[in-house]
Image (spheres, grey):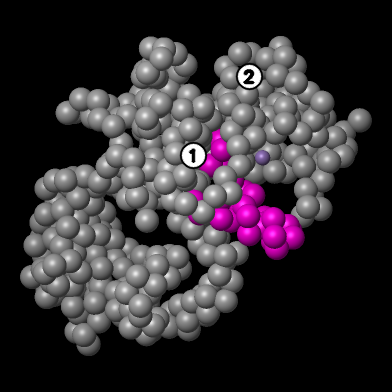
């Protein structure tokens, strides 16, 4: 007997169709039925049937990976909690969905057993390394990040002590991990949610202030963007210009680091320009510096020198009429994908390279260009195999 209404799966099936994700709905429905049956009448603390969490995790991954998502990762996401939380064991999963799904579910289950509760940063770094080496497969980490994101989104249903513990673990382990893999979209949401639970007063205060000044800011951004868009048109440069909201956590960190009040943080305004190719990035930069006065120590060329997590972009801060400072980021649409999604932007399930593991060479599948090793993440670049720097660059 179905204890769970099957329409829970509806939104996921819709996104598969919309994003043209090559997954047969039948296999997915079978995995859903398996999870729903295994979790039975279990409820989340939010009061919803447990399986809604499993579907939410698959949904986050489908959103993140878009057409690059594959059946294996989505089915594994649906089943990610059955071994840990139900009577179903790995043999059941393997018999029903094959060894690859079983491998991923096993990886997520093992990582789920690890908890980090030490405050020291170096310990956190070691913990992240252990997590990466245990995961063996990048897909395990992606499922775990999606899992953590959904748990953070629903953290309000937990008692404050547990909520604080999970938020701290997220801030020390999972947000930096997302950052290291370049998945900015998940990193930012995790960090803002951590702030919400770890410093609720600051979070609410900031949210209110940002909200208050919103209209003023939007008008200002409009004023800055208009001449730029006109000039782009005259020069026939195809570029998309968008206003960019700043994340609460980044404002918070800036205030803390510089010991400033909200009113003293000048570059709350952001603009992003997306161009079709690299040469246009530099043309746009010239154009912006021609229109507005650049703050000279604020210019960074991450296109010529990408960050260790592959991030590429030009950054400049300019002073606009009225004296406000606006931070501008300029990048190609391809760089933008990488900036938002990191490794997930390069996730191609069908083309894999082997894991470069210290102990065993060439084990489980990993998306092209990326390999996990005991020491961290390695990326195949035009310059060869490069290790992603482990360190505090996450802050
Ligand atoms: Mn879970």
Give how far across and how far down residue 140 sits, in percent. Answer: 53, 30
Left/right of residue 157 with respect to residue 107 in the rendered view: right
Horizontal and vertical percent for residue 24? 61, 24
Q: Which element type, helix, strand or loop, lies under badge 1? A: helix
Position of 268 relative to 23 (above/below): below
| 169 lies left or right of 324 | right
- Pick the quarter of the image with the C terminus: bottom left
Mark 2 vs ligand 1: CB under 8 Å? no
Specify whether 27 is left or right of 370.
right
Query: Which residue lies under the disc numbered 1?
Result: 127
Q: Is residue 151 left or right of residue 212?
A: right
Q: Residue at x 53, y 72 (%)?
A: 203
Chain-order first, disc 1 or disc 2? 2
Can you identify the residue that label 2 sits on?
102
The residue segment tinted magenta is 143-172
Relative to 380, residue 61 above or below: below
Ligand 1 quadrant in view: top right
């Amino acid at each position: 007997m179905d204890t769970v209404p099957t329409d829970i799966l509806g939104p996921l099936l819709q996104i598969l169709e919309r994003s043209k994700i090559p997954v047969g709905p039948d296999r997915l429905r079978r995995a859903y039925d398996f999870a729903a049956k295994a979790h039975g009448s279990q409820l989340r603390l939010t009061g919803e049937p447990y399986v809604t969490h499993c579907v939410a995790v698959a949904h986050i991954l489908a959103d993140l990976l878009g057409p690059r998502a594959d059946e294996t990762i989505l089915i594994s996401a649906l089943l990610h909690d059955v071994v840990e939380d139900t009577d179903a064991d790995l043999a059941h999963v393997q018999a029903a969905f094959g060894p690859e799904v079983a491998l991923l579910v096993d990886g997520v289950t093992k990582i789920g057993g690890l908890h980090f509760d030490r405050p020291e940063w170096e310990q956190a770094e070691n913990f992240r390394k252990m997590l990466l080496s245990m995961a063996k497969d990048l897909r395990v980490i992606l499922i775990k990040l999606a899992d953590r994101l959904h748990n953070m989104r629903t953290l309000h249903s937990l008692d404050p002590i547990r909520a604080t513990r999970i938020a701290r673990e997220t801030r020390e382990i999972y947000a930096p991990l997302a950052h290291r893999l370049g998945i900015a979209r998940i990193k930012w949401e995790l960090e803002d949610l951590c702030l919400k639970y770890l410093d609720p007063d600051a979070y609410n205060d900031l949210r209110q202030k940002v909200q208050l000044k919103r209209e003023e800011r939007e008008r200002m951004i409009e004023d800055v963007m208009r001449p730029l868009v006109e000039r782009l048109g005259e020069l026939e440069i195809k570029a998309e210009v968008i206003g960019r909201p700043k994340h609460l956590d980044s404002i918070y960190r800036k205030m803390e680091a510089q010991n400033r009040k909200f009113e003293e943080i000048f570059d709350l305004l952001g603009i992003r320009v997306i161009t079709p190719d690299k040469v246009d990035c530099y043309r746009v930069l010239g154009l912006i510096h021609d229109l507005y006065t650049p703050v000279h120590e604020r210019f960074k060329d991450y296109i010529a020198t990408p960050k260790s997590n592959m991030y590429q972009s030009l950054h400049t801060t300019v002073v606009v009429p009225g004296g406000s400072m606006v931070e501008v980021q300029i990048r190609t649409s391809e760089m933008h994908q990488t900036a938002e999604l990191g490794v997930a932007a390069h996730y191609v399930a069908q083309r894999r390279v082997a894991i470069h593991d210290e102990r065993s060479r060439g084990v489980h599948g990993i998306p092209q260009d990326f390999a996990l090793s005991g020491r961290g993440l390695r990326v195949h670049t035009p310059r060869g195999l490069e290790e992603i720097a482990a360190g505090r660059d996450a802050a």
